[in-house]
């Protein structure tokens, strides 16, 4: 009987550790540090504050539409001056893309391949920002609990999801905006969290027992979709046919098919992708010196 009681206590205590309450304090901190990123008035993705002076980290592909490039050489010509971020409480901060990520070859190459970039407030902030602590890629292992937060599908309110790191691996990338056919290998992971369009640029945070010890280990960067290119092609094909077809019944079918394929492309089915925070940590250190 005594052994049974001891086993029961240990078993349920163990369950309590792995099913710990997420907590309002974590939610409040995310609401004060995770932002929507807008370019020319259009919501592009997510970012998060990484310093007291309001520096924002996000994915390079989130901010890429702000960069005007030469169509042939891919060289940057200019950067949009209409970029801002918005917090959960609707506070709006005008920001600019740190120019090194555009005009410095090393920074641009690292940012594009590893998918990260920084935004800075245009005006000197009148207050200190609450920010998220950055860890390292080595801080998290396969099977560790993590959580993400952001504004998927152009949501106007923050959405937070909890899951775990499924597999860490070296991801091969061949970015369009770097001349040549060089293939890069970057630190990445599949995470057992649903990530949709708009989650990109949001933090991937390792869940610790005490919320004060939680640190950002990566950024939400991609999602796993089988045959994504085929779905994209089919979506564009049927939506274009819908515009040209006069028969109402056929138009309805083509529109439905186009929207269906588009929904598959823009939605994730429980498998998100993250990239390492290490590059961001390195560049933040260089900026601070």
Image (cartoon, rainbow, N blue to C red):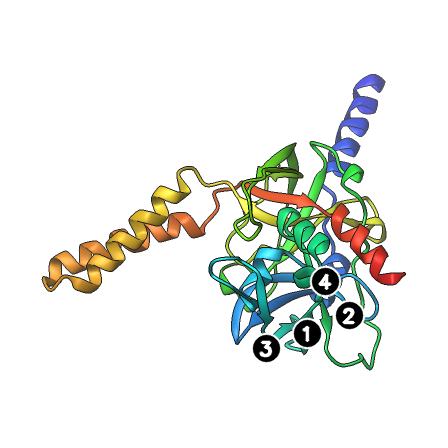
| Camera-nearest residue between 42 and 154 | 42
Query: Who is closer to the viewer here, 275 or 17?
Result: 275
Q: Are marks 3 and 4 in contact (CB under 8 Å)?
A: no
- Residue 153 lies left or right of residue 250; in this view the side is right
Residues at marks 4 and 1, CA–CA distance in whole angstroms: 15 Å
Determine which residue is flagged by label 4: 100
Q: Which residue is mark 2?
A: 54
Instruction: Write down the residue under mark 3.
Output: 82
Q: Quadrant of the N terminus?
A: top right
- In which quadrant will I find the C terminus? bottom right
Q: Nearer the viewer, residue 29 or 79?
A: 79
- Residue 209 location (% of width, % of height): 82, 44
Q: Residue at x 58, y 50 (%)?
A: 178
Residue 86 position (above or below residue 111): below
Q: Residue at x 29, y 48 (%)?
A: 234
x and y percent of residue 236 in the render?
Answer: 30, 54
| Residue of label 1 | 95
Binning the other alpha carbons within 10 Å of mark 4 as few (below 14), some (14 to 19) or many (20 upward) gives some
First in residue order: circle 3 vs circle 4: 3
Q: Are marks 1 and 2 in contact (CB under 8 Å)?
A: yes
User: Mark 2 or mark 3, which is nearer to you?
Assistant: 3
Q: Residue at x 21, y 64 (%)?
A: 243
Query: Which of the two discs, 4 and 1, labels the residue nearer the N terminus?
Result: 1
């Amino acid at each position: 009987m005594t052994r049974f009681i001891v086993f029961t206590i240990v078993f349920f205590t163990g369950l309590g550790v792995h099913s710990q309450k997420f907590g309002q304090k974590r939610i409040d901190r995310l609401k004060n540090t995770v932002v929507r990123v807008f370019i020319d008035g259009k919501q592009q993705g997510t970012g998060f504050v990484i310093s007291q002076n309001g520096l924002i980290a996000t994915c390079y592909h989130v901010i890429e539409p702000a960069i005007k490039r030469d169509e042939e050489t891919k060289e940057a010509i200019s950067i949009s001056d209409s970029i801002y971020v918005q917090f959960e409480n609707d506070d709006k901060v005008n920001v600019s893309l740190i120019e090194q990520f555009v005009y410095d070859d090393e920074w641009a190459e690292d940012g594009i391949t590893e998918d990260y970039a920084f935004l800075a407030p245009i005006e000197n902030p009148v207050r200190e920002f609450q920010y998220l602590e950055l860890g390292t890629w080595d801080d998290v292992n396969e099977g560790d609990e993590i959580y993400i937060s952001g504004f998927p599908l152009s949501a106007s309110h923050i959405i937070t999801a909890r899951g775990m790191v499924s597999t860490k691996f070296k991801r091969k990338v061949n970015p369009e905006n770097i001349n040549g056919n060089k293939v890069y290998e970057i630190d990445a992971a599949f995470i057992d969290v649903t990530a949709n369009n708009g989650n990109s640029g949001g933090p991937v945070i390792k869940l610790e027992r005490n919320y004060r010890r939680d640190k950002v280990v990566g950024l939400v960067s991609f999602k796993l979709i089988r045959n994504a290119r085929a779905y994209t092609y089919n979506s564009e094909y049927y939506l274009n046919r819908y515009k040209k077809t006069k028969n109402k019944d056929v138009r309805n079918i083509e529109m439905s098919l186009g929207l269906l394929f588009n929904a598959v492309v823009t939605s994730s089915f429980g498998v998100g992708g993250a990239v390492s925070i290490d590059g961001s940590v390195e560049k933040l250190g260089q900026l601070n010196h």
